[in-house]
Image (cartoon, helix red, strand yellow):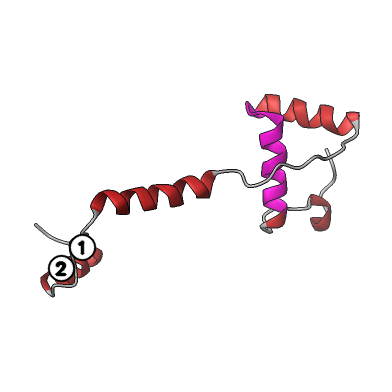
Amino acid sequence: MILDKDEREILESFERGEWQPISDLKSEIKRHQSYATATFKPDKSVHVDLSVKDLNVLQKQALIEGIPYQTLIASILHKYVSGHFVDRNAYGASNP
């Protein structure tokens, strides 16, 4: 069997005795499960007033995408704060 680079590194690490058994495996699994749960759990709820026109557009777009409109709004906000939201007008594109 031929090992790739990552697999060789893991095997060599194991053979050097760098891997140690976990004494309380159940507790360790629970700890990591709580990390995973906290990662995907919404932190806060906010109230935002939107114009009826904007809300209708968001709801229509969410329907097209097949997702709840609240999820669409959260996605738009996430893209904005993480720097992934692209302003088409900044690049000379016209609005639809």
> Height in image: 15 above or below 90?
below
Amino acid type at mark 1:
Glu
Location of the C terminus (image quadrant): top right
Residue that label 2 marks: 14
Sequence order check, earlier mark of 1 and 2: 1
Residue that label 1 marks: 7
Residue for point 68% across, 25% down: 64
Q: Name the one closer to the observer, 85 or 69.
A: 69
Q: Is residue 17 magenta?
A: no
Q: Name the one closer to the observer, 89 or 13.
A: 13
> Height in image: 15 above or below 71?
below
Give the total number of marks visible in the rendering: 2
Residue 74 numbered mark, or none? none
The region drawn magenta spans 65-80
> Height in image: 62 above or below 4?
above
Q: Name the one closer to the observer, 29 or 78.
A: 29
- Characterize the local packing of mark 2: few (<14), some (14-19) or many (20 or more) Cα atoms within 10 angstroms: few
Q: Secondary structure at mark 1?
A: helix
Give percent across and percent down for residue 65: 65, 29
Q: How far apart are the two marked residues, 1 and 2, measured between alpha carbons?
A: 11 Å
Front label number (1 vs 2)? 2
Q: Name the one closer to the observer, 50 or 54.
A: 50
Query: Residue 38 vs residue 51: left or right?
Result: left
- Characterize the local packing of mark 1: few (<14), some (14-19) or many (20 or more) Cα atoms within 10 angstroms: few
Give percent across and percent down for residue 10: 20, 66
> Height in image: 95 above or below 51?
below
Query: Residue 4 vs residue 54: left or right?
Result: left
Q: Secondary structure at mark 2?
A: helix
Residue for point 24% across, 55% down: 24
Location of the N terminus (image quadrant): bottom left
Give percent across and percent down for residue 45: 71, 41
